């Protein structure tokens, strides 16, 4: 029998999951969830569930992580992680960014189970069904936690938007595609890679 959670195709509040009332979820509640194969996140104490990932999403995540590994890990600037890997941004904010960069100066935030605090760079690979969530809830969460740089990749349009935190809000450095290269403050050398290569 297929449940409403199994049929959903957008990021939605996981109101059917047993636990505290929405708005009161914390990392401890989240960590106690059974492993049911679903992808959960907490934003402002609200538990969300994401749809299953498609092949274009997976391809983009792998390519982005690959190039970041070359420009971050191999050059010894820091470390790169891929979902599923928990990031506890704040007490009521627990997310699993598609790709995460921790520079050496931030490695104290890394524990055996999760990252506690703001990574230096997060990347979300968006689909039409997750674009709103990535631009609203996730963007607000990352800004609130002080994540310096946020990339939003869109495999359907083969574009990448780079957002830089200025004060408490993100400012877009632009939406890049094709042979254009990214302008990154966290990983400046990534400008060597044409954006189209992030999508295979």
Image (tube, rainbow, N blue to C red):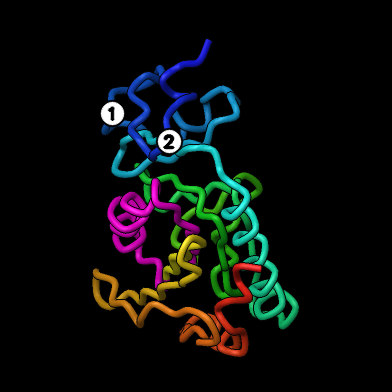
Viewer-proximal residue among 38 and 154: 154
Q: Quadrant of residue 148?
A: bottom left
Residue 123 covered by magenta stretch: yes
Residue displayed at 28% across by 77% down: 171
Q: Find the distance from the CA under tag 2 to the CA under tag 1.
A: 20 Å
What x and y, as percent, mark residue 173?
35, 82
What x and y, as percent, mark residue 140?
28, 57
Find numbered disc 2 in the image and state the secondary structure of the residue it sits on. loop
Residue displayed at 49% across by 83% down: 182
* Mark carried by residue 22: 1
- The residue under label 2 is 9
Left or right position of 2 against 75: left
Q: Quadrant of residue 20?
A: top left
User: Which residues, given as a range, are shown in magenta?
Assistant: 122-149
* Mark carried by residue 163: none
Q: Nearer the viewer, mark 2 or mark 1?
A: 2
Residue at the extreme top of the image, as rendered: 1
Residue displayed at 50% across by 87% down: 180
Viewer-proximal residue among 12 and 121: 12
Residue 83 covered by magenta stretch: no
* N-term mark: 2 or 1: 2
The vertical placement of 174 against 34, above or below, is below
């Amino acid at each position: 029998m297929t449940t409403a959670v199994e049929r959903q195709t957008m990021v939605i509040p996981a109101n059917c999951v047993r636990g505290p009332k929405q708005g009161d979820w914390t990392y401890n509640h989240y960590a106690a969830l059974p492993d049911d194969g679903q992808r959960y996140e907490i934003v402002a104490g609200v538990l969300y569930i994401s749809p299953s990932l498609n092949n274009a999403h997976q391809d983009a995540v792998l390519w982005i992580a690959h190039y970041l590994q070359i420009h971050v890990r191999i050059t010894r600037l820091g470390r790169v992680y891929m979902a599923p890997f928990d990031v506890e941004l704040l007490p009521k904010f627990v997310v699993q960014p598609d790709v995460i960069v921790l520079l050496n100066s931030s490695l104290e935030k890394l524990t055996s189970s999760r990252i506690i605090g703001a990574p230096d760079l997060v990347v979300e690979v968006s689909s039409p069904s997750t674009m709103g969530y990535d631009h609203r809830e996730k963007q607000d969460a990352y800004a609130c936690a002080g994540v310096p740089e946020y990339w939003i990749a869109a495999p359907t349009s083969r574009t990448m938007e780079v957002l830089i935190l200025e004060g408490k809000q993100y400012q877009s450095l632009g939406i890049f595609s094709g042979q254009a290269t990214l302008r990154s403050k966290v990983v400046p050398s990534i400008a060597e890679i044409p954006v189209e290569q992030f999508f295979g």
